[in-house]
Amino acid sequence: MKKQYVISLFALLFSFMAFAQNGNIQGTIIDEKGLVVPFANVLIESESKGVISDADGKFLFINIPTGTQTVKVMYLGYSNTEVQVEVSEGKTTNVTISLEAKALELEDVVINGYNNGQAKALNSQKNKQNITNVVSTDQIGKFPDANIGDAVKRIPGITMQVDQGEARNIIVRGLAPQLNSVTLNGSRIPSAEGDNRNVQMDLIPSDMIQLIEVNKAVTPDMDADALGGSVNLVTRTSPNGFRMSTTLGSGVNFITDRRIVNGSFLVGDRTKNGKFGWMASASINDSDFGSDNIEFEWDDSEDDFIKEHDIRTYLVQRIRRSFSLNLDYALDANNKIYVKSMYNWRDDRENRFRLRYRSIEFIDEDNPELGYQGEIRRQTKGGIDNDRNKNTRLEDQRMQNYSLGGEHLFGKLQFDWLASYAKASEERLNERYISYELEETSAGDPIPFNIDLSDTEFPVITPANASDVNLSNYSLKEITEENQYTDEEDFNFFANFKLPLDLVGNGGFLKFGGRGKLKEKERDNNFFEYSPENGIFDSFNLLPLVDKTNDDYLAGSEYVAGIFVDPEYLGTLDLKNSSLFEEEDLPEEYASGNFKVKEDVYAAYVMTEQNLSDKLSVLAGIRVEATSVESTGNIVNFIEEDEDNGIEEAIVINQVNEDTDYVHILPSALFKYNVSDNTVLRFAWTNTLARPNYQDLVPYQEIINEDEEVVLGNSDLSATESMNFDLMAEHYFKNVGIISAGVFHKEIKDFVYTFTRETTVAEFGTGTAGYDVFQPQNGDDATITGVEVAFQRQLDFLPGFLKNLSLMANYTYLTSDAKGIRNGDGDERTDVDLPGTSPNMFNGSLAYGGKKLNLRLSANFSDSYVDEVGGNKWEDRYYDEQFLLDFNASYAFSDNLRIYFDLNNITNQPLRYFQGVKNRTMQSEYYGRRLTFGLKYDLFKKK
């Protein structure tokens, strides 16, 4: 009996692999420049067979009858193209099909490269089975977006959180950055952030990416950790023929009047026999800029007032470099291997000058009219004086990815595999701070303050008497140096198998496979304080100083930063010289933040796509993911001095290990109905998850005595799960455009939020009664419901030159509700939005495209939303609304050469947080406008 089963199994496998009397057709689709055409509709009508080309423009038909076959390619914005292919028995025939954009040549309407790029993006979106938004490299280049984060923010349903004026963290459909996945060529990108899973989108230059795919409904062959969606960045592939491109540019940041330098270069080719192709690219952007920042910490007493206020000035040099090399080689017609690599490296040099008014309180609580009193601190942030730090805090972030993969065809069986190694790291060495404080007047009294709360969006705090804040009265608070290092390593491998499977007679396939993701993340910091052995630091006013007073301070001239220690002087201090400074290791400043996490995820899936009719298709399947987490953290406790019992003051650090294992079973079904050739209806039911942030899972305890706070980890956190429903209607215009509308709904459970409470007893050691305790916890359930609408097209129905205008606009509306968020008393809060859900998001652009001149005005808006919940509504932190306006222009001297001009942040939009109510500012940070201009040259040669 066993022997019969074995024979039957081999017979079945052989039947899949054999294709006697038949052959295969394999091909690549390119445009008139020789660039690949992704996601085209490819048909053999005589056999009633159709496939979609992949992101590299490649397609494959298997088990096709021998003889002459007609292959037809349909692509929005291009003429339908047919080619004759001779199919030989038992062989795979290779063919290259070139498309021409003749269908775009409308009378009196000028067609340029933008329309071709838009056509590629819309075809990709139209022909995919799932709900996807796609942006091509041609479109990316038409917007003034230096990094990939700024490019992604123009996609419907997406908003970004900024860092120093650049889009860094992505929010998809209202889900926070750590709840979405970002992949590079299908493999998860590791995070250089120390405490979360956020991928730094501003680390990757936009000109290094060929295609951006935002999958809002994932399929079983995709990673499931994409609660909001999955953003896949596709790197540039080898061209069909020789290609070379270069960009050189410069510019200015108006906030500092300092320069911008940028450049990129790519070159690639393919051998005459077509077997070996390569593409190398490099990019650099060097920008000197800064920001003006004001911050406020509000007291929650009955008489609202500010207990702490910062005036900050940042000076930053950000150098972003990126390198990529991709190779592919066809062993024969049925077997191909490839290597893909990318190395991103960003240096972020920063000096910060911070004036802080702190410990502000009423002079007499019973008589508030008497005013306020407090302390003053002046702090300089810098770094050691060497060739790397250059007297600044140097943040060295790197992300690298290397992969080896293959694509094979054995009869009817398609097999592809990949093994990759990726690493992200952040290193901050010899980061230095020097602080001076003023706690009392020369008469020994607290420093009186005037506080103007007539405009709580821009409160003003100033010392009541200028004579009280004489520089000679300041004393040294501290000199410190710290070193921080975080890295995350990923080992990734997968294998996919695909076979024809026609259940209803209209075509279909079966696909199954598995993936392993082995991840390790570690953070290793230290912190030292240095006490001078001589009195040179006793006199603040005698040190080398710099004045950061700025009449053009973007937050308002009433915010006066004043005088600080020169960072160049701070950088030259010989802190390791024991005759000059006494060094003290302060583990309480870093030990609780150090951790190690090992996370292994193994996944398997099976799915099938079936054409139920000539209009209706379904993709259904199931994915199983098993997760194992090992985490190591530090519990830090303080032992108070007890002379009576002979106990000395000490810090006790206990290392704790925790293990967690769980399994998720995730079914899905996605339907696509082609109402007509250009109208599509989609429905999707999917299940996704999001694993907790790394540090949230670590068993750690941090006691911050100065702020009277305790921060805890939580190894018992569950992964967040979501059941998702999507319905989308799309109509594609023949002149390259789209109008679409859709609704989506997410049912989420076990979301993570920060629980806040106040201790009533000294549960964390002597003197900790009344401390605020913060710990991540799982909420109960949450829902998100939203509507997305989008419109793109050239306005060719208008008269005269107006025919060359094109409009792009999209709008997303969200509503959310979260249950299970509790206040400090343990009572459930009501009417709480899920953090990260911006209720209104809008993107739009109006462009003019002439034969040589192209102009574009772009707008991006996102409404305010809860960023982090507190112990009550008064403590909730909100990310304020943003309205960004950009302009760019280009002029083409020829098909290969053009100049460009970009103006960013025309509205001088600040990053702003507010506390509880909109007019209670927590932070406002201004970046100013940015201007860049330059030259682009492209050279294409088709084989």
Image (cartoon, rainbow, N blue to C red):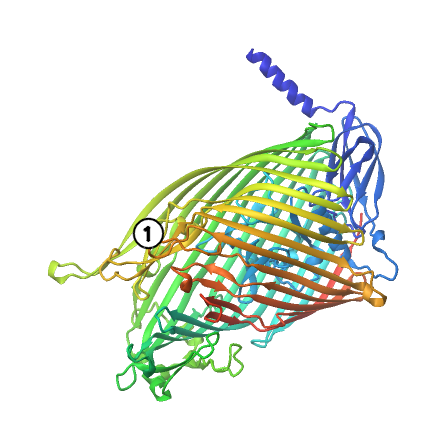
Q: Which residue is mark 1?
A: 634
Residue 516, position as x, y percentages in the image: 52, 38
How many numbered discs sit on the rendered protein? 1
* Residue 919 visible, this orientation: yes
Residue 797 higher or lower than 664, as above or below: below
Q: Is residue 766 left or right of residue 472?
A: left
Quarter of the rendering occupied by the N terminus: top right
Q: Residue furthest top?
A: 1
Q: Residue furthest left?
A: 644
Instruction: For label 1, count other residues whose C-alpha is less than 10 Å away and answer few (under 14), some (14-19) or many (20+).
Output: many
Q: Nearer the viewer, residue 828 or 598?
A: 828
Residue visible at 42% across and 42% down in the picture = 629
Q: Is residue 661 left or right of residue 45?
A: left
Q: Is residue 818 left or right of residue 368?
A: right
Residue 829, position as x, y percentages in the image: 41, 55
Where residue 410 sits, quadrant-wise, is top right
Residue visible at 76% across and 35% down in the picture = 614
Residue 746 higher or lower than 772, as above or below: above
Where residue 449 sits, quadrant-wise, is bottom left
* Residue 198 visible, this orientation: no
Q: Nearer the viewer, residue 65 or 712?
A: 712
Please name the amino acid that badge 1 sits on.
Answer: Asn
Residue 419, position as x, y percentages in the image: 57, 40
Q: Nearer the viewer, residue 260 or 326?
A: 260
Q: Residue furthest bottom?
A: 467
Residue 149, position as x, y percentages in the image: 59, 58
Residue 867 higher or lower than 521, as above or below: below
Q: Is residue 186 left or right of residue 196?
A: right
